[in-house]
Image: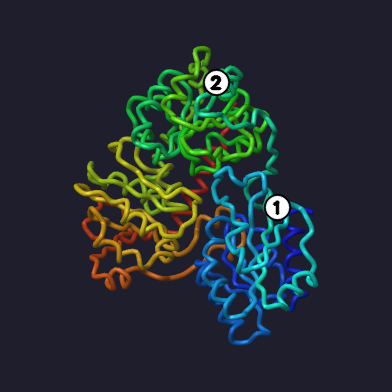
Amino acid sequence: MNSAEQATAVLKVLAELGICEVALCPGGRNAPLVHALDSSELFRVSCFADERSAAFFAYGRTLADRRRLVAVLTTSGTAVAELLPAFVEARYAGVPMVAITADRPASYRGTGAPQTIEQLTLLEGYADVVDVAVGEPVPTASELRSKLAKRRSVHLNVAFDEPLIEDGPGAPTRLGEGLAMDVEPSGHDALQRWADSVVRPLIIIGRLDEAERDAVREFVRRCGAVVYAEGPSGLREDTAIADQVLRSGERILRPDGPLFVDECCDGVLRIGHVPTTRLIRDLAGQLHHLPHASVSSLPFSGTPSSVHAVGSIRATLAGIDVGWWQGETARRLLDIDRARAGNLDRLFAEWPRSEAAMVRHLSLSLEPSDRVFVGNSQPIRLWDLAAAFEAPARPVGAARGANGIDGQLSTCFGWAQAGCRSIGLFGDLTTLYDLAAPWARSHADGPVHIVIMNNRGGRIFERLFSSASFVNAHELAFDGWAAMWSATYQRLETTSAPWSLASQVTELRPDAEQSDRFWDAYGRLHEADDG
């Protein structure tokens, strides 16, 4: 049973339960359910950008009419946690509810992979939990009806593997056994065996604590490998390793490209926290035959099939012998990357009102002492792609634990430090998720200026899925929100001159057509023959 068939089976059971209305919170992992709903005429579908609101909406429907049971459908990760308040309320009101939550395959649990948490126990005590593995049959309507008849809520957790939909991203995730094991902080034998098995690895650097950066920088210089460094690593713009860091975006490392497989990489090493980019997951799936390893101070490998060294990053990297690694073999990849980075600069100039070009312009408009906090899910990806490498290196923060969009603005206010300005870059839906956040500004240690990329919905999904249900399109503006908190406000739509970010709330309004044209051109940029 593939993902589409499994999703159809879930909807069939809901219909047999007499459910004819669904509160849908679309996301990547529940894409099979979103597309199944698009093809069904059995349900009234209400789309929500906020799972907490969706759950209470469903609760209110059933509270008004016990015969009107509404199912709540969410993606994986912290989206599931947002359901808890409504399910607590329903439990003590004797109102049964139904939650259908998507999940990653069970092999990802406990790895810290993006959008993967231990969600099975979140509603435990307030709902009967049913875990449905990848490709497994869903419970029958009669099995679920017996629980609901006792005024017990039901949490149906359905794991989906990739491809999620036929026209969606990704490929079947084939995770090899490889050298999968945990490494004690005091023993790095398995990691050294990994290092002995490669000569031209790719290094992907996620978030690093400030105290770890010197050691990672020295290791990168010592080994000479190609590096993809995310903004929160603190090394993306580091001049000491600038000639090793890729600048044209993660797509140059597409796992199915002949350049990558045949010439530039025979292994993958992740350093620091689990990265933002899904590249690490794609590589572990499509290039499962290559040896993968990770070094982190946290017990999360990011994938189920890699050697994972837990402990001091400084001590671990110092203990790895890489004397035989051939850094010079990466030169061709770096040459192609620099050419594509030049073309990328031309795309910014050609489509100046695109989302990506506006983030480039923002990075060039900041003061040298500014700190930047980037929100999930599109802003952090835009920053890694578009922020100017020529700009001064600066602290870049992000809340990348479970990769949800909840509480991002509030986190930024807490992250602020005295003596400098913090610029928070967030999407419109992320901001709508945390409208009460400015309450915390009086407690912040330093000034915080909020920049909102308002592209009128979750536009990142338009490049991933064909269904409009994912977008949560709207025509809202944030001037009224700023006024409610007595915050100064400006709206910017052009990049013809440097921006002044003196206002406490800045709303960026990219041009949708220019954004589409930019992404189309960027895709073609990386479709060039690597041969």
- 465 or 23: which is nearer to us? 23
Give the amino acid type for the residue marked by disc 2 in the picture.
Answer: Arg
The residue that appears at 39% across and 39% down in the rendered structure is 345
Residue 448 occupies quadrant: bottom left
Image coordinates of residue 132 in percent, x first then y, are: 72, 57
Expressed as whole percent of the image width and height from the top left, the position of residue 496 reads: 28, 52
Which residue corresponds to mark 2? 200
Which quarter shows the N terminus? bottom right
Residue 425 placement (x, y as % from top left): 36, 53
> Which quadrant of the view contains residue 386?
top left
Pick the quarter of the image with the C terminus.
Answer: top right
Q: Residue visible at 55% across and 20% down?
A: 200
**Does 196 appear above or below 58?**
above
Q: How many marks?
A: 2
In terms of depth relative to the viewer, which is nearer, 529 or 57?
A: 57
Residue at the disc numbered 1: 166
Secondary structure beneath dot 1 equals: loop
Q: What amino acid is found at the position of numbered circle 1 in the picture?
A: Glu
In three-dimensional space, the C-alpha distance between marks 1 and 2, rounded to whole angstroms, equals 34 Å
Q: Is residue 276 left or right of residue 62?
A: left
Q: Residue at x 31, y 45 (%)?
A: 363
